[in-house]
Structures are given as C-alpha cells and as structure tokens.
Amino acid sequence: MKKKTFVALALTSCLALSATLTGCSLVSTNNRLDMEQVIATVDISKSDKFSDKDAPYTDAVSSKNIIKRELVSYFLNVGYSYIQNGSSYKDTFNALVEALCNNAVLVQYSTVALLQEAAPSVIEAFKKETEEDKKYELLLNEVNEDSVNLAKYKLYSSINSAIDNYEKRVIEEDDGYEGTDKRTTPTNLDTEQDDYYPKNEDGELDYGIYTGYGEYTLKNSGAYQKDALDGTTRSTRVKAYNSFLNNLRRNNLVDGEKEADVLTDVRKLEYIKTEYVSQLESRIINEYYDFFEEQKETALLNVEYLHNAYNELFTAQEVNYGNSSSAFDTAMSNMSSSSFILYSPETDDSDWVIDYGEKFAKYGFIYNILLPFDAEQTVQLNALKSKLTADGDNDAFYEARNALLKNIATVDQRSAWFNGETDYSFKPDADFAYYGKEDGRNYLFFENNLTDSEKGGRYEKLQAYDGRYSYNGKVFQNKDESYTLVPEKLDIDKMLDEFCDYVNYVMNDGKAGADHITVNKDSSKYYAQKKFYKDNEKKDEIDYSLFTYATGTVGFDFNSKDLMNPETAQYKAMSAVNELQFAYTTDTSVLSNYVGYSVTAYDTSYIKEFEYAAKEAVGRGPGSFAVCAGDYGWHLIYVTYVFDNQQVYDIDWNDTEAVQNEMKTEGTFLNLFYEWAKSNNTSNISSTRRNQILNEFNKDTTVTKYQNRYQDLLDLDK
C-alpha cells in the first residue's frame, strides 16, 4: 500500500512556471542589494512555549532570515494568480510574507521534533554544521535515506522541465513543425509514482541537470536522457538555458554581474541553492508530519474505525438520497475513487421502465462511442429534418436517416496524439505484444505509463485504460517530424467486430482464449424497417426500440466492490472499452470521466433514441451494450456500473480477516474507502497540528517583519 505523502507548506518554487513568466522588475534599481534585504526573521526558541525538553536544541534552531528574493520568487509562482483573481498587490504580498513566516516556523518546529528522535552523533554534527543545506541533509539522512535524493530529484527535474519549455520553441523553430491539435488523454498520464526517484546500482540518484554547458551534458544527465526532447542538441539546449537565465535575471532572481562567473554552473547560482534548501525544508516538514501521523493512525485506522466511518456516511446518504432523486443524480455525477455512493434510492415505475421479469428502472453509468455523420451526410440529414411534421407521419425521415447511418465510415480519432502539441506515439519493441500487430499496425501511445508502470516502476498505471490498442491505420513519419496518417475506415459492423475482438483480447490477456461476448443483431431486418410508430389509436408515439441496431453482453461476474480492481474481468473489459472510446468517439465530453455518463432512472436530457437504448442496457446490467441510431450518428453504449439495490456494497464487517485483506487489495472498494478515510483522518490530524504549532509559535516574540524593506511591493497598486 502506498504511503501517503502530505503536501507540506514549504514554499519551493515551481521553476517550470516561474522561469517562463515574462514578468517585469518588481524591485528598485539597486537590484542585488535590494533582493538580499532581510524582510523577516523567525526564531521559535525565543517563545515561552519552547519547553525544557526543547532547550537542548536552542542552538540548533538558529534565527531564520527571509530575504526579499524569496518573496519575489514566491510571488512569481503563486502571487500572480491572486492578482488575477482580484486581490490587490498589498493584500497579496502581505499574505505571502505571512505564509513565508508560517513556513519558517513549521520548518524550525519540525527540525526540533526530528532532532529529538535522532542519534546523539547526528545532533552534534547538526549543531556544528554551518551550511543550511548540509544541516538538513544530515537530519534527513537519519530519518529517511531517500529524502535527500527525493529533494534533489524534485529540484533537478523542475530545472530540466523549465529548460525543456524553452527548448521546445527552439526545436520547433529549427524543424518548422509545431502541432496544435488536442485530444483528451487518459487519467494518470505521465504521473510519477509517489516517492519515486531514479537510482543507479548503488541506490544513489541517477539524474542530472542538462544545460549544455560544462559538465551539464546530456551524457551526464543520467535518467533524464530518457526524457530529453526529440531533436535536442547541445546548441538547442544552450539557447534554451540562456533564455531560462534571462528570464530569471529579468525577474531579479539571478544577479548577472555578481554571479557572472557561475552562470553556466546552474547549481552554484544563489537562487538555485535557495530552491534546494526550500526542497529540503519541504522534506523536513513532510517527515515530521509522517512521524506524527503514524503515531495517531495505528489507534484509529482499523476495521472498527472503518465500519463506523462507513455507517456514518451510509446513514447520511440514506437520509439525503432517499428523499430526493435529484440529490442522487448530483451524487452520481460526482462519483469517483474518493467520492463514494453507499446508498441508492428505490425507483418507481416510470415512462422508461424496462421489463426483464422485474418491473423497475435502474440508475447506472455508461460509456458512449459516438460514430458521427460526416459533413456531407449532415447536410443531407438537415435537409431531411426540415421536412419533419408534427402529425406523427415521419416514417420516411427515419427510413432515410437509416440509409445515411448505413454509410457512416468512422476512423481512429487519435491523430492529435501524433501531430498535436505533444507527440504521445511510439513504436513498441519487436517482442512487445499488442492488438493489431499481426495486421501490420505498429504505433501505440503513452510509452511511459504502458512500459514503466509495474510495481517499482516510475509511472502510475493509466486509469481504466489498457493501452494495447494500436493506431488503426498506416503511419508515415515526415522529415519535419510530423506524421501522415492513413486511417482504416470502419462502418458500424466493422466497428462492432473491432469492439468485440479487442475486449476479448484484453480479457484473455492478449492470448487466444474464450469468446466472452454475445451479440444480437439483424442488419437486414433493421434497414428494411419502414414503420417507426407504435400501433395505437393515435399512431403518434415513436417506438424507440426500433432504433436499436444491436445489443449484446460481455460476460463476467460483476461485483460492485471490484469496480477498480485491475485483476478482475470486469475491470479488464471496462479498460478495453474505455480505450476504444479514446480511439473512436467524437463525443469527447465522456473521455476521462470516472466510469462514464450517469443514467438516471427517470427522464434525462439525452436524445430519446439514446435514452431508450442506454436504459435498456442499464436494465440488463454491467457488461451490457447496445448500438442505437440518432441524429448525431451511431452510439455504441457500454454499461460500466449499475445500482441494483439500496445497500450498494454487501460487506460482512464481522469477518475481520476478509475486510482487512480487501483493504490491502488495490482497486477494491474497501481499499479505496480505507485510503479515503485515512487521508481524511491524517489530513485533519496534520491540519490540526499545523494550526496548533502556528498558534503557539507565530508570535511577536518569535517573528519580526521589516515592512519598510518590502514597502515598494505593497505600493505597486499606486
């Protein structure tokens, strides 16, 4: 189980952001002296709350000076957003100074708390060390052997990312190609695992900064070599690094005259040294909170605690959702891995009741793969729609619309992942197994997550996205690094075949195996249909069942507790269908939704053909699918989740061992609920502790501010 990492209050700058802001000078003409002014000092050892137990560490907690450069840097990172949201410069800078002081208090307190647990030799060495970064490194190495490497990695990767932003522009100017297309990408894309840093065989950090100067070559940049931009050269990198420096100078974060002899040695810049100290301080606070929280977690987070939390939430939802279907509809739209629905209300008979032995409507979630009319077909459809009448005599329209639907030819929509702002495509190694390989298809996407997300890997797995569905078409790379794509055209029958084949492929783990899918369709009967109204006296009620082209089921035993458990058949099927959504649907609003669109048991805002087919599929349960016609084209609807009863999860809380096992199994409901409860609990613990520390130690006796030294920043409104 992953250890939670608390987001500390250390104010480490996001270099990738601050260094790319155009900015303007915020200080006086005497920049160097001005930026080095001390604007506040913090020393918690002066507080009367500093107890006898803390006294031996008084000399270890030396007075902390906050200089103006830190305030300007902090403003460039977060202050601009305050201004954009309507705050004045005065209020913004006063808030930032207060935050910097709070942070210094927390760092000093956390340092004392960790020193109290350290070995005497470490304490003695800490007191003797005069350089701030070396002091923190000593203490962190005692507490957590990974902390210092993590701090360095966060800093170095931030610097590389900042320079990357500039180098992209240089490379694009050189090669003449710049993609602009966008398409939504899956959840967790390029998200690194918690507490990851690249290591060499000795367990040391294998990652360096690449500027193109001196020792900062690509060859010496360790694991960054894998992340380096395509087309990078020493020349393009040097240009990018110079732009990076110029922006830091423009914002008065680097002194071009004083530091002229070290400008090409990035780690010797005072600004970068300060950023490294800030990273170390962030780790100090995190390590203290981890230590404090672990003491509290053991007593609170057990099966009994979890059961009580479950009952409390269930009771609240029973009251709320039982009296309001709209409240439940809202809850469905917000459901996620940290926003749970434990209770679903009863449903009454409605106009959309589906009879499968039991007569009731259901709530559920669906994916929607929309295969649209092309431009010419849309013109023809609009011409047909102009002739619609209100008297129910529109059979000719629906018959003609079916003829247009029959000729829809969809293609793989992922061209933006080749030629967009970021090229996510890659050619897999010859021994890598994926769907379409035997047909000569040779491009996949998201190499980082797909090939480096196993246990101990660098990246998170993509959420409900298998990743082995290759681009459906031919791909040619051009001299300017763009791509020419010749996609395969699919009508609805070929799309259904592709759907079934890929879902089976994923459920069988890429090997030959059972056919898990049943499909019911009669194309000849569907296209021969000429009457679309129910046979009643008025003959004005449309029979929406006649717009369902096909139905089917993906076979698996559904368990609501295993919705996000990657080891289950239901998750594998869902992740395959979700990937096909990303590949083919032009309804992009459904992409990266947790488990798709919510379908209420009552009236919806969807078009009626879609609503009928979706409710019919939801009525049959998870794994069901349907293809229906509509004015937008074909809809391939897949059911991911259904609420069958009021008690959504059947949990035997008396079986302590079974509950504990599920709490440890990734993706199960109890695992996600446990992580949520733990996060809430420890967050409250940390927040409470933080407030206690600040209330006790951020006083006039411990914090001194020199407002006259940053008055020019407060006066920027004038």
Image (tube, rainbow, N blue to C red):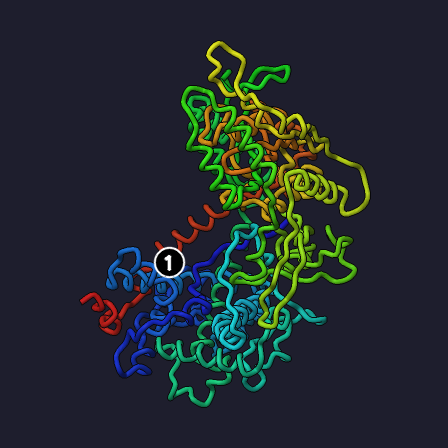
x and y percentages locating residue 688 in the rendered image: 42, 48
* Count of residue discs: 1
In-image side of 673 versus 80 (left or right): right
Residue in view at x 46 percent, y 17 percent: 540
Horizontal arrangement in the rendering, residue 110 relative to residue 23 (left or right): right
Residue visible at 50% across and 58% down?
Answer: 181
Looking at this view, is 700 or 200 the one in front? Answer: 200
**Observer able to see residue 432:** yes
From the viewer's perspective, is 439 left or right of 70? right
Judge whether 272 appears above or below 714 on screen. Answer: below
Element carrying mark 1: loop
- The residue drawn where x is 73% and y is 52% is 436
Q: Nearer the viewer, residue 292 or 701?
A: 292
Which part of the image, by quadrant, shows the C terminus? bottom left
Name, please, the residue furthest toward the left: 718
Q: Where is residue 401 in the image (x, y as percent from the top left)?
A: 53, 33
Task: From this view, report whether residue 608 is shown above or below residue 159.
Answer: above
Residue visible at 51% across and 45% down in the picture: 376
Q: Residues within 10 Å of mark 1 (few under 14, many from 20)?
A: few
Q: Is residue 665 visible to the viewer in this orientation of the structure? A: no
Seen in the picture, residue 659 relative to 178 is either above or below; the reply is: above
Front one among 516 and 631? 631
The reply, left or right, for residue 599 in relation to residue 717 is: right
Q: Mark 1 highlights which residue?
A: 49
**Along the viewing direction, whichever of 628 and 240 lies nearer the viewer:** 628
Residue 535, horizontal then vertical, whole percent: 54, 13
Q: Position of residue 27 (x, y in %)?
A: 28, 76
Residue farthest toward the right in the current orientation of the protein: 512
Report the residue that reaches farthest toward the top: 537
Dot 1 amino acid type: Lys
